[in-house]
Image (spheres, rainbow, N blue to C red):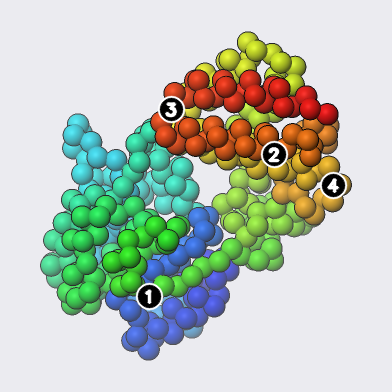
Amino acid sequence: MKFSEIAGHKDTIDRIVNMVDSGHLPHAILLSGPSGIGKMNLARALVQYLQCQNRSNGDSCGVCPACVRNKSMNNPDVHFSYPIVKSKSPNISISSDRFDQWKQFLEESPLMSPEEWNRILGAGNSQPIIHVDEAADISRLAMLSPLASDQKIFVIWQPEKLQQNAANKLLKLIEEPLGSTVFIFVSNNPSLILPTIFSRTQRLNLYPLSDAEVFDYLKRHSSLSDRELSEIARLSEGNLRRAEEFIGQTGERTEFSQYFIRMMRSAYSRNIVDLKELSDIFHGFGREKSLRFLEYCAKMTRENFVFNFHNRDLNMIVQDEETFSKKFSPFINERNVEKISVSIDDAARDIARNANGKIVFFDFLLLLSRYIRTS
């Protein structure tokens, strides 16, 4: 990965290049910002730049042996750590036990969707975390001499998911790194990082991209018209992964949109049989996916309410959602929008607390069928 391949973040890239070229790169860097804006791409470009044998014009060459090793994820001096779900059979306890899946993830989802990683892991309702065994492995690897370069580099994705005892085990290593060891932390939610780790890093904040930067990125990766790309860039709110989802309308957003439409139609017609079937389907999502679906419902409730103001710039919906909202939006109005929103929030709270999903969803859908007819 080269800096020139990254969309946006020019100021941060310039800052990183200056630190590397001047020999003042901190031994622990935290790249933080919203998910889906390319933080891991930047981390990988930094790794490649650090080890490139022929840097020029503020970028790696992309063709030297070190660059080739980094592009193929075959560099013995670069180690990735990431949340996993432990397993006794087969024995899964550290990140390297899931390295094949990790390579697949980086190739297929370079914008780093946590939901996609959970799917690849088969996490279900389990929460992937970075265990103390991982910290012990990092400490062991840090003791070894570099094999192909002058540096040992550790890239840790989602340090906010470090176990307390894992973080404690890394503290001394981060404070007093062995040799030329570099830690690069990539975080979607830095406020959740343990203070003992957070305070020992130099933080570089990354922000959502501008509409123009998203447009330029999409232009290189899509054959849609400029008008369509401009609209998608506006709707993405600076999030590249969201922009890609808008283009393909694949994955969860499409699935959630279809269920939202079916749910609202069945609620309005008071089709109890279908509402019961939907509650079973939503329960089958599992806790984490159920929470994401309820978050989508909350967003679409807000979008349909705002649609009534007839100001298109206020809405952040794609064409299929807009087609439904044109007819449906009058049924989300000032007399019921708050009740519907509260019922969604209540359902999400109960699901997060591991309440019975079938009961929670069926109660929510029954309430919805009553509120939706408020004219």
**To which residue does mark 1 refer?**
202
Label 1 neighbour load within 10 Å: few <14, some 14-19, many 20+: some
**To which residue does mark 3 refer?**
355
Q: Residue at x 44, y 47 (%)?
A: 114
Q: Identity of the amino acid at label 1?
A: Gln
Residue 287's x, y, as percent?
A: 44, 32
* Gap between marks 4 and 2 measured at Cα: 17 Å
Can residue 1 be seen here? The reply is no
Q: Give whichever of discs 1 and 3 has the lower sequence position.
A: 1
* Gap between marks 4 and 3 measured at Cα: 37 Å
Query: Disc 4 or disc 3, which is closer to the eye?
Result: 3
Left or right: 103 in relation to 221: left
Say which element carries label 2.
Answer: helix
Residue 154's x, y, as percent?
A: 28, 64
Q: Identity of the amino acid at label 4?
A: Phe
Q: Identity of the amino acid at label 2?
A: Glu
Q: Quadrant of residue 180?
A: bottom left
Q: Give whichever of discs 2 and 3 has the lower sequence position.
A: 2
Left or right: 50 in relation to 345: left
User: Which labelled disc corresponds to residue 338?
Assistant: 2
Q: Give whichever of discs 4 and 3 has the lower sequence position.
A: 4
Left or right: 138 in relation to 110: left
Residue 303's x, y, as percent?
A: 73, 43
* Gap between marks 2 and 1 measured at Cα: 42 Å
Relative to the observer, which residue lies in front, 255 or 55? 255
